[in-house]
Amino acid sequence: MSQLLTEFRRPELLQIVALTLRVTGAALLLATVAGVPIGALLGLVRFRGQRLVTLVLYTGMGLPPVVVGLFVYLSLSSSGPLGVLGWLFTPTAMIVAQAIIAFPLVAGLTMSAVAGVDRAVRQQVFALGASRWQSAWTVLLEARVGVTAAIVAAFGGIISEVGAVMLVGGNIEGQTRVLTTAIVLYTRQGEFALAMALGVVLIAVAFGANVLLLRLQGRLRDQ
Amino acid sequence: MTTAPACYRLESVQHRYGGRVVLDIGSLEIRRGETLAVIGPSGSGKSTLLRLLQFLERPTAGRLWFDERLVDSEPALDVRRRVTTVFQRPFVLNRSVRANLAFGLHVRGWSNRPAEIDHLLTALGLAPLAHAPAQSLSGGEIQRVALARALAFDPDVLLLDEPTANLDPRNVRLVEDLIRERQAQGVTVVLATHQIFQARRLAHRAALLLDGQVIEVGPTAEMLDHASDPRTRAFLSGDMVY
């Protein structure tokens, strides 16, 4: 126990936590900015090929992170189509990979939440004089609890993810080492106390972030 | 009243759902400023007629005019905003009663009109519930919130689908008083109801709808007391005619 407490005082710990929050936060922001409007649109409109799009989105929700990591790795490698960007083994590559993992979760669950809003709401809002945009926004607000749940699910999915960030980040000390990749490394090296300390921090960070998101969800529900 | 220009005009209007004809109206005129009661049994097409008048759907066939303008596509927003409906099963938004009442004002970019909202809350006995979450209310309270919300932005046309279906006699009176207040201001009201006595109390004219067809239309008292069509007489006397 005392060894575990000692590990919490390791100077690199703060840096690892900060990078984890930076990468996951940025990826979640990107996925939310793209995923919520697209999910809302898919939940609101009917069009040809919608079932196919839904199927692709739902498949994306279960996409193995390591496969996403491989795809991003190959795209960003020097011989890949985006190799010229020079992002491989940088936090940017990790953000891209995590955003790709989070996007279908945010979009798919938002779509379900919006589609689940009673059709009567749209007709009521129309009859009260709302424009198309105002109607869409009102329906999205009615689905706000489900939309927040989508963001919470995506956050949980990417902060605990290891395969993709390991592949595209490379787990470079001081540069691309995040909590999950650090846990893998220290476990392999037999530094179990440090790995455990990082595991506790990861759970605490995830818990704290979810508390914030759920408080937001509760506030939205009560509005 | 008889010389008032037409608010709505329907000509050979037919509406189908999945091939089934649910509305088949040869001719019907609703005059500006009048209250027309559309009476008929459940499933006779009253709600469908209101949906067409609210521009939620376009007739499958025939022509519908609003203010002498043919409605062949979704009307412009400013035209649409002159009409509102209180649905039979009204839906309140997941926010407070007061915020629900302000919704129509907000989408129009108007200020909150607190005095008007207070008047409506008081008139409908909702003042103690002003800050309660609207979705926590009872069916009757929700129906009153829906009416107050519809009146908050002074519509020119008020479409009411069984507006007192869930209300006790005291609240029926509150609602009817408020409808009379708007009638006096020249609002056109279309009241779909199967309550004959309510039609008698509120409407200038009444139209009987059976199986989607207008059987008879005329001044309310005249039609209810001296119906010319045997099907109207049968409906009014409570016989099954459908």
Image (spheres, coloured by chain):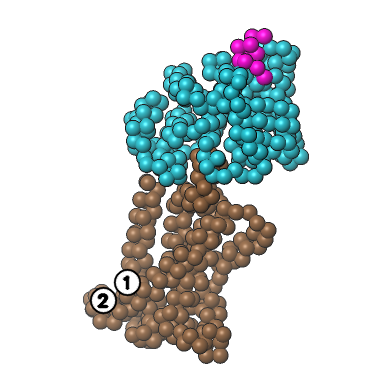
Chain colours: A brown, B cyan
Residue B240 falls left or right of residue A85:
right
Tell me the chain of label 2. A
- The kind of residue tagged 2 is Phe
- Name which quarter of the figure residue A151 lies in: bottom left
Q: Which mark is residue B166?
A: none
Q: What residue do we see at 30% from left, 79% from top?
A: A15
Q: Which mark is residue A8?
A: 2
Categorize mark 2 by other alpha carbons within 10 Å: few (<14), some (14-19), many (20+).
some
Answer yes or no: is residue A94 visible: yes
The location of residue A55, given as percent across then percent down, is: 63, 63
Q: Which residue is mark 1?
A: A201
Q: What residue do we see at 51% from left, 32% from top?
A: B156
Real-space Cα distance between discs 2 and 1?
Answer: 9 Å
Q: What residue do we see at 26% from left, 76% from top?
A: A8
Taking depth in this image into account, of A84 and B117 the one nearest to the observer is B117
Q: Element under label 1? A: helix
- Name which quarter of the figure residue B205 lies in: top right
Is residue A140 placed above or below A15 in the rendered structure? above
Answer yes or no: is residue A166 visible: no
- Quadrant of the image containing the N terminus of chain B: top right
- The kind of residue tagged 1 is Val
Would you say the residues marked 2 and 1 are in contact, meaning their CB atoms lie under 8 Å apart? yes
Is residue B47 placed above or below A123 in the rendered structure? above
* Residue B221 belongs to magenta span: yes
Residue range in magenta is B217-226
The location of residue A205, given as percent across then percent down, is: 33, 68
Mark 2 vs mark 1: tell me if same chain.
Answer: yes
